[in-house]
């Protein structure tokens, strides 16, 4: 996640979660909103979001909870289809958009 360092002593960010000023030197930013480290947590499991997070309708999720609530499983390889991956659907099944997962001759 990108961080927004304070540029001088007068620059102060407000945490989008707790609405308190962020006085730490490191400010975490997600989609233009700023957070304390302690406030950047998954809305489902409450784990700290340290490396990667996903956002849906303003709520922040860890990868596993986001996939659990909004992801799909590829019928070809049985792996998760992430939101930024290309996919195709056929006969109610989701597939990665690749020849390995979506061979046109195998699905009729």
Image (cartoon, rainbow, N blue to C red):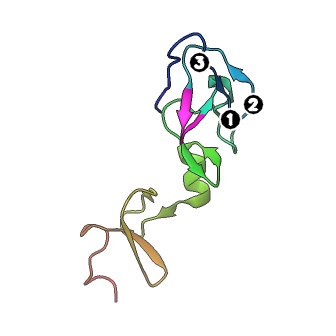
Could you tell me which residue is drawn at 54 percent across and 54 percent down?
Answer: 67
| Residue placed under numbered mark 1 in the picture | 16
Could you tell me which residue is drawn at 42 percent across and 58 percent down?
Answer: 79
Q: CA distance from mark 2 to mark 1?
A: 6 Å
Whether 29 is among the magenta residues is yes
The residue at the far bottom in this view is 108
Badge 2 element: loop
Helix, strand or loop: magenta stretch: strand
Badge 1 element: loop
| Residue placed under numbered mark 2 in the picture | 19
Circle 1 or circle 3, nearest the eye = 3
Whether 7 is among the magenta residues is no
Residue situated in front as seen by the camera: 86 or 4: 4
| Residue placed under numbered mark 3 in the picture | 11
Q: Quadrant of residue 76?
A: bottom left
Q: CA distance from mark 2 to mark 3?
A: 16 Å
Callout 1 environment at 10 Å: few (<14), some (14 to 19), or many (20+)? some
Looking at the image, tell me whether mark 1 or mark 3 is earlier in sequence order.
Answer: 3
Badge 3 element: loop
Q: Quadrant of residue 47?
A: top right
In the displayed structure, would residue 55 be above or below residue 85?
A: above
User: Does the CB distance between marks 2 and 1 fall below 8 Å?
Assistant: yes
Boundaries of the magenta span: 28-33
Task: Give coordinates of residue 108: x percent, y percent.
Answer: 34, 89
């Amino acid at each position: 996640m990108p961080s927004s360092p304070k540029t001088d002593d007068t620059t102060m960010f407000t945490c989008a979660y707790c609405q308190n000023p962020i006085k730490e030197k490191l400010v975490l930013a997600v989609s233009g909103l700023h957070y304390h480290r302690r406030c950047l947590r998954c809305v489902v499991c409450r784990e700290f979001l340290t490396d990667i997070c996903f956002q849906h309708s303003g709520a922040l999720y860890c990868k596993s909870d986001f996939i659990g609530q909004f992801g799909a499983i590829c019928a070809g390889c049985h792996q998760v289809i992430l939101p930024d991956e290309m996919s195709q659907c056929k006969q109610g099944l989701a597939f990665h958009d690749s020849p390995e997962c979506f061979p046109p001759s195998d699905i009729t």
